Image (cartoon, coloured by chain):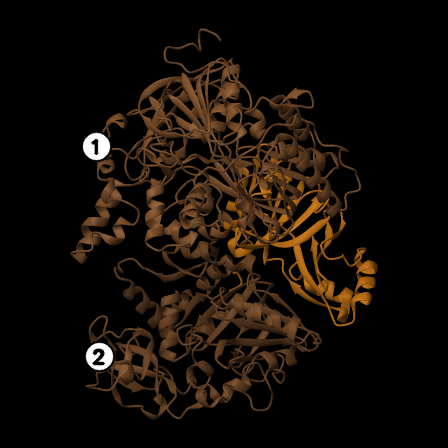
Amino acid sequence: MADLSLEPESALGGYTQNFGDTHLREVTGLDIVSIAVSSGARDALSTLLQEKIGLPWPATGTIERAGDEAALLGLQADQCFRVSASQQQNPVTELACLVGDAAYLTDQSDSWVVLELDGASSVSALERICPIDLSDNEFGALNVARTSMEHISVIIERPDTHRFRLYSPRSSAHSFLHAVTTSLHNL
Amino acid sequence: MSDRLALPGSHRIGHGLLSSEQSLTFTFNGRPYRAMAGDTLASALLANGQQLVGRSFKYHRPRGIFTAGSEEPNALVELGTGAYREPNTRATMVELFDGIQASSQNHKGPLSFDVMAINDRLSSFLSAGFYYKTFMWPKAFWEKLYEPVIRAAAGLGSLSGEPDPETYDKGFLHCDVLIIGAGAAGLSAALSAGRAGQRVIIADEDFLPGGRLNMETFIVDGLTGAQWAANAVAELRAMPRVRFMTRTTVYGCYDHGIYGALERRTDHLADKPAGARQVLWRIYSKHAILAAGATERSIAFGDNDRPGIMLAGSVRAYVNRFGVSPGRQTAVFTNNDDGWRTAMDLVQAGASVSAVIDSRNIPAPFPVPGAQIFMGSFVTGTQGRLGLHSITLSSGQTVYCDCLAVTGGWSPNVHLTCHQRGRPVWREDIAAFVPGQDLPGNMHVAGAANGSMTLTQALTSGHAVATHVLKELGATTAPASSAPQADEEHSGISALWQVPDCQGRSWVDLQNDVTTKDIALSFQEGFRSVEHLKRYTTLGMATDQGKTSNVLGLGVMASLNGKSIEQTGTTIFRPPYTPVPIGAFAGRSRGKHFRPTRLTPSHQWAESHGATFVETGMWMRAQWYAKSGETHWRQSVDREVTQTRSSVGICDVTTLGKIDIQGADAGAFLDKVYANMFSTLAVGKVRYGLMLREDGFVMDDGTTARLGDRHFVMTTTTANAVSVFRHLEFCRQCLWPELDVHLISATEQWAQFAVAGPNARRLLENIVDAPFDISNEAFPFMACAELSVCQGKPARLFRISFSGELAYEVAVPARYGNALMAALMKAGEAFGAAPYGTEALGVMRIEKGHAAGNELNGQTTAANLGLGRMVSQKKDCIGAVLSRRSQMNKDNAIELVGFIPEDASVSLRAGAHFIDRDAEATLDNDQGWMTSVAFSPDRNSSIGLGFIENGSQRIGETVVAADPLRNEFIPVKIVSPHFVDPDGERLRG
């Protein structure tokens, strides 16, 4: 049946909303690939990443970023996420060619729904749901962490001072959106 | 004093610290009153001469305002109306706003004529623990008559009975130093820490920070205490790393420097803004300084509970902060120097003091103009019906007064130091308990909370503790070099707990109507432990938790048993320090927002095609899809099963856990966690796997596909998706860290659909992109592949079957899930493809005899499930050794078999236990139980799966499925668990 085709749907339909001085939106069209270091290949992988995509292996809790186009999120000692703005059918294939056996790659593009919170009230809103200390000294720009918000596993990324990206599982995206908007309403 | 304030009956004698600019109105029991901005409900009532504000808990005695703070035992009122009504609110803590409506509680009839006051006349019969000894007969009357009557007669306020419409929230805060209390010690500590650049949170339950500084007339650094406090607050608020939280009570101390705090954000506003009324904060601190001050306590003497009898420090608070004299003629009864300060402050504010009665045999510290001085004297009784009229002294002399300021000393607020089982220690010199050495980690105590009872001591102590904390934190910036300076004051005390030979009852706990006689009775009954005293008499319970009465009660008990207070012991405290609304604990977690909801990728499609949903864990899954004309769920489910078995059906199975397992040692890892072998699985193949716990029982099952040499994808049951992943990560990180293997959840990544039925392959041929061949020869049972569908969309295909039919599971990235469901249905139109839900899924798996959650209940073994041979003898795995225990391999072990009723019209029930025919339904005769039942359209009968002793050897035997709870005893025949296609021809076809 040649006429059967599949159109992609974002989990939140491209949600975007202003809350006073703060803007909340769903970030769509991202490729997210988990990069896990194969045994003993940490240095080799770091070198490859620097050479091939221009970003070094990120220390745990930090982001190596090249603008909004690409970033490596350091999630744990032997794992990071590569986040890039261009959505491909199979982002693993391209990256696999670059890193070879030095890493194990898993497509996570559809696992996570990314909300971006941008504005002066971001921190105040996140204080309501995020157990992490978001002070500039503890979690400033270019920091990332895995945490739990409202019983949902969340990756929180801080690209710059007033901007946060929140990665939550796709299946509970509506619940998490409710959690964030409630925080903004309740200020 | 302006004319505006000089109202008839007004007790307003000045402005205190209030703003004279704004006048407010409020009602109490429907009567309008006027107040000033900055008043509490208590100060406003006193300003308007309203001494009587409530009735006592048990005896319905008239009660007035006793304190000026959160320790208030008497003045509990109801605020608001309708669903917003809030009972048991302390009038002393209510920040007045224009239009507030308050009413008294716990009385029948008018407040001034409460018919329940008859209880007071019957007090001889209602002493402590009376209900333990009376109302014993007839037994049935207790629950039906006595208890309801007692509860109706005694109590506090009443709830609205409606859902609370207010919004509550919670949140997380972090700091280097948490300072609890913004009085002299707290502000002194905060200034030191803040000036040193530390990240400070300072919280105070009052809306006006300053604590006693706002209530006294002391001078600090050349300024009035209140002005110094205001300056300090302004300086702290201007510091970017200091968060000043007023109207915030730190109510609990938890592990690792975590504190609970309740912030009241809108309670004081007439026009409530959008947002949360109250926020429950979890504060993470590196260090905490408890500067919660101290609470004044009373002295027990005859009829010491009348409206107009107040704590002396509170009288000072009303005079100095609120410009209110609670009485027109005030007498002071004291055992310490503090009482004299009350007398002087009253006189200096222009109020009249009739007498100062000091129990100590010492010279009067100073004269009080206009007042009679009685040294070495006591108050032995009081007179007045709804308010104080006069007092009687130990000499027999009567002194006329409408307010009696009493002080028995001050008790440090040690509550938070006890929240991790810390025990306070007694200090004889101040006649009070102070924090012991066993403080919660990194908690420090400053000021009066630590027994530093004078202002100078408090300021110095705050500064010193902060300096110590800064050192602990490694602060590089030096704190202020010296503490603020204040005049030294007299603070001598001679303990006095109760006045002997009094007229009337001497009250200890005003909130619970506990008298010295009750304590004596408790002692007489043999209760020696303070904890027992508390429970027998209810001393120290309810909303005030005995803040004004605990130490007094201990003192009375100590005098009864002839021991010191130290020997008598003390109770300790637990959270919360003051009441926290249940709504605040719930926060935003109300209704469906109590927990997250997970939606499958095809949820939207299912919703638009009439699905009825069921919650499975957090997931919302389509349970069945009702068609027009179907009036009962069984009709829909039977149709879905029949259509699937006869043609093809489609079910969203995304909820099954999917774990991506990669690494050079991935196969070896799976061999260790699965009972059966996986390292030998060929690429492009799937194998059913059984996972055991350490104890040898079955943990979970599922299929695992090998997509590459170093790449597996494991599926788990929906229910165990998280626990299995957690288990695998534990194994990977802790048991075998040397293995080169990585795990990541892919449950959310892939939308996965079961396509089952004889036409499943033909349907999929319309989806799968050429040239991939899914013929039986090219893609046999238990094959898997990565391929593309619907014109190039990446997909995975697994030929596995839960239904027992020819079946596949096809997966695409979740963004295509909803579209793929629609595409599958379109591709199956020619075959009459039916979407099916979890009910049909369950029916078909029972018909096929597949185990699921009901069978994998944590108490069953591989052998019980008929899968004993899957536990490989060629390798070791988690649970293998213990699965070989003799008790788990008994000859008469239970085995999973099928059951059908002898009478096909009868429905079976899961949970029924199997017994022999004619046997009694007892545990001794129990042979097993029914785990799962369903109506099988294939057999047109109810069928069941269950465990029964030696099941596989008893095929054809009849037993009884006994359900004594429902009085059902159904003869059932033991059959093979494979009701459909027992030889597996369909799924391999």
Q: Which residue is mark 1?
A: B115
- Pick whichever, B877 or B61, lies toward us: B61
Mark 1 in CB contact with mark 2 (< 8 angstroms): no
Is residue A141 found left or right of B823 in the rendered image? right
* Chain under disc 1: B
- Pick whichever, B518 or B12, lies toward us: B518
Helix, strand or loop at mark 2 = strand
- Pick whichever, A119 or A102, lies toward us: A119
Q: Position of residue B302 (x, y in %)?
A: 34, 33
Q: Which residue is mark 2?
A: B970
Three-letter amino acid code at disc 2?
A: Ile
Mark 1 / mark 2, whichever is N-terminal: 1
Chain B's colour is: brown
Chain that is coloured orange in the picture: A
* Chain under disc 2: B
Three-letter amino acid code at disc 1?
A: Val
